[in-house]
Image (cartoon, grey):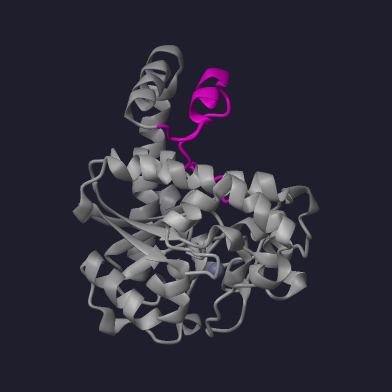
Amino acid sequence: MTQLAYILAASHSGSTLLTMFLNSHPEVATIGELSPGHIEDLSWYLCSCGSSIRECHFWRWVASAMRTRGINFHLEEFGTGFWMPDSRIAAGLLGTLHRGPALELLRDIGLRLFSPWPSRIAEIIRTNEILVEVILEYYHARLFVDKGNRALRLKYLLHIPSFDLKVIRLIRDGRGVALTYMDPAGFADAKDPALRGGGSGGQRENKRLSMAQAAHQWRRCNEEAENILRGLDASQWIEVRYEELCKDTENTLGRLFEFLGIDPDKRAREFRTVEHHVVGNGMRLDPTSQISLDERWRSVLTEEELCVFDREAGKMNRRYGYSDNGI
Ligand SMILES: [Zn+2]
């Protein structure tokens, strides 16, 4: 069985930072998201090593190893996502959030009866299995880390018999996350403006949400995570806060490595000195290993915005231990 850890987190909760921390251990391999979605323009998209993803020696090696194993692998679209855009019914059924066991059963029945999903999912599972195997081989590692913000992906990964899966649930103060949804380029991307938008320097104006939308998205994402975790054995998952990861990095990582069955002492202390080929959030392109807790929401969000957040998601935020003054 292949050991896999899945980081389940609302986007912009610090999961790229956490994957890079975990990847600083020689027994761990990761590329951030195993299913990063469609990469629109490969010509400017940067890998975390600084090369364009097309030129990066790691990605060239992976693509060639995948082809050797009979998988027609493309960097634009890895083929690892549990979706099916070419079937309207399947796309509709796969587009909604994870909603608990009863509705998940209905989703599964619908997919089986009314769409070509059963044959497609076998292909997607195989691509996931082989890509994980290839990347573990490159790094000579034994634990693969995947991350994502959709519980539905986790649901399908849990059904792959060759994966021995554990879940790290990462939570960050919803007010900090909501601010990143209101302005992703300004608050959740590379420090260097020229490297934002995946390396294009884009300001991502079309991705901005209002505070009401942002708070709603954060709350729904966490409700979805709660739904799926309810069905798991307590020994299979662990919860961690972004804030404790930044403030008490050593102890938090020690706890996580122990949960994953890995000796924490072998980890490289300067995580940027380790070879990383990570796709996803722009912080992967920052040059420093220095960790600073990002709590810009405290000075940036207005009283009115905080009230809007509180109406939509304040109850959940407090339940996670975030008071008016933070954690
Ligand atoms: Zn690279």
* Residue 73 in view: no
The relative height of residue 289 versus residue 167 in the rendered view (above or below) is: below
The relative height of residue 170 versus residue 140 in the rendered view (above or below) is: above
Q: Position of residue 205 (x, y in %)?
A: 80, 53
- Residue 282 part of the magenta-drawn span: no
The relative height of residue 237 versus residue 286 in the rendered view (above or below) is: above
Total numbered badges shown on the rendered structure: 0
Which of these two is toward me, 6 or 122? Answer: 6
Q: Position of residue 63 (x, y in %)?
A: 49, 54
Left or right position of 17 against 312: left
- Residue 73 part of the magenta-drawn span: yes
Left or right position of 42 against 79: right
Residue at left offset 68%, top offset 66%: 187
Q: Quadrant of residue 117?
A: top left
Q: Furthest residue to the top?
A: 113
Residue at left offset 78%, top offset 60%: 202
Q: Position of residue 193 (x, y in %)?
A: 76, 71
The magenta segment is: 72-99
Residue at left offset 67%, top offset 50%: 308
* Residue 118 in view: yes
The relative height of residue 205 versus residue 243 in the rendered view (above or below) is: above
Q: Position of residue 143 (x, y in %)?
A: 29, 63
Answer with the quadrant where ligand 1 appears in the image. bottom right
Residue at left offset 28%, top offset 83%: 266
Which of these two is toward me, 296 or 285? Answer: 296
Which of these two is toward me, 286 or 169? Answer: 169
Query: Magenta segment, principal secondary structure?
Result: loop
